[in-house]
Amino acid sequence: MNQSFSKALSSLVMAAGLSLALVSGSSFAERAPMAPLPSPSGVDFPLSVPANPNSLANGTQAQSQPANPSIFTTANSDPYNFVSIPDKEASVLIQRSGEQWRVIRNGIITVYGGWLMALAFFGIVAMYIVKGPIKLHEPMSGNLIKRFSFLERLTHWVMAYSFIGLALTGLLILYGKYFAMPLMGGVAYGSFLMVCKNIHNFSGPLFTLSIIIFFLLLVRKNIPGEGDMAWLMSFGGILSGKHVPAGFFNFGEKIWFWFGMTFLGLVISSSGFVLDMIVPFMEVQYIRGTMQIANIVHSSASILMTTMAMGHIYIGSIGMQGSLDGMRTGSVDATWAKEHHELWYNKVNK
């Protein structure tokens, strides 16, 4: 009887001790969780995320890879994490600046750029309807004066046609999804846009080359000089209603040459080379951030140059009598030269 009681008491004591051990072990495990065992793949996935994500890189992952904050805790961030594949862009799961770029491109550039071009276009149409083309005050004399060489005219027309091709295809790339895609359908529009993109990409270097050659050919004739201040003060005769004497180029043409053609043209060209990943003579990292900045610069400068080019094309074609002759044949009538570029006309006829 006593032996049975002793055995029963010993069993109860052992069971109580084992229970206490299990309870104490469980409470200790809650206070200090054991590090997870290494996974067969060598990449450790934590059971819980600590306050400091850098502390995760302490298992087999730390032996084969550098210290790396968990991609899963920094998904919506711009800093690069570590990846072992060649494409380092894959180490950023969500790029926050990409949303900022999308808002700027589809908001500020697309909306305000569209309004700017629309105002310029309808302003030119209104001017033509109200005032009509600028006519000469005297009839054509029939005496021709040489104005542009063959090389100057060839370079100008190469630049002009390549610009028109770039402008039309660029506008389709920027705005086509709003009006062309609903009409054509997604598949046809995608194929059409690919053709536009190839035309755009191959026309770009030709446009850049023509800008450089045209600049070298005519830079000396576009240096500010006599008559420019008077032209500026009267806005080319708009305020006074009289033609202001000008040299080979008036001040308005010089603004177009220096800012519209040269500055904006080279900004568009350089940013386009970045987007095409063909920048010569220097090393550029073609990462998402670089491409987004280049796209914003390229689109903004292109819209501004297109707006200015509308006025240049209008004045050089139907907006002014006789203005197209210089670039079409190389010579202008003496009456036109005297009326619009009197200072240059006087030097030629000395």
Image: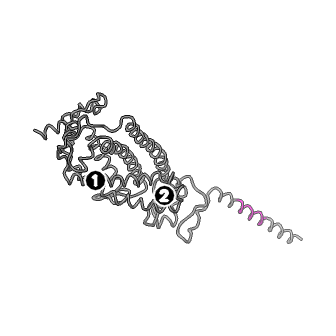
Q: Is residue 135 visible?
A: yes
Task: Kindly state the secondary structure of the residue where label 1 is placed.
Answer: helix
Q: Kindly give the residue lying farthest to the right in the view shown.
A: 1
Name which quarter of the figure residue 49 lies in: bottom right
Category of crowding for the residue at label 2, using alpha-carbon neighbours closer than 10 angstroms: few (below 14), some (14–19), many (at least 20): some
Q: How is the image coloured?
A: one colour
Name which quarter of the figure residue 334 lies in: top left
Q: Amino acid at mark 2?
A: Val
In the rendering, at what x and y percent does residue 121 appear?
41, 42
Task: Kindly state the secondary structure of the residue where label 2 is placed.
Answer: loop
Is 136 located above or below residue 178 in the figure?
Answer: above
Instruction: Give, as a single range, the part of the protein colored magenta.
Output: 13-23
Discs 2, 1 touching: Cβ within 8 Å: no
Residue 342: within the magenta? no
Task: Give the main secondary structure, helix, strand or loop, of the magenta stretch.
Answer: helix
The residue closer to the viewer here, 75 or 17, is 75
Q: Which residue is mark 1?
A: 157
How many discs appear? Answer: 2
In the rendering, at what x and y percent does residue 224 appear?
21, 38
In the rendering, at what x and y percent does residue 267 appear?
33, 49
Query: Mark 1 or mark 2, which is nearer the start of the sequence?
Result: 2
The N terminus, quarter of image: bottom right
**Residue at horizontal 47%, vertical 66%?**
63
The residue closer to the viewer here, 20 or 165, is 165
**Residue at horizontal 35%, vertical 46%?**
305
- Residue 92 bears which disc, if any? 2
Category of crowding for the residue at label 1, using alpha-carbon neighbours closer than 10 angstroms: few (below 14), some (14–19), many (at least 20): some
Residue 20: within the magenta? yes
Q: Amino acid at mark 1?
A: Trp
Q: CA distance from mark 2 to mark 1?
A: 46 Å
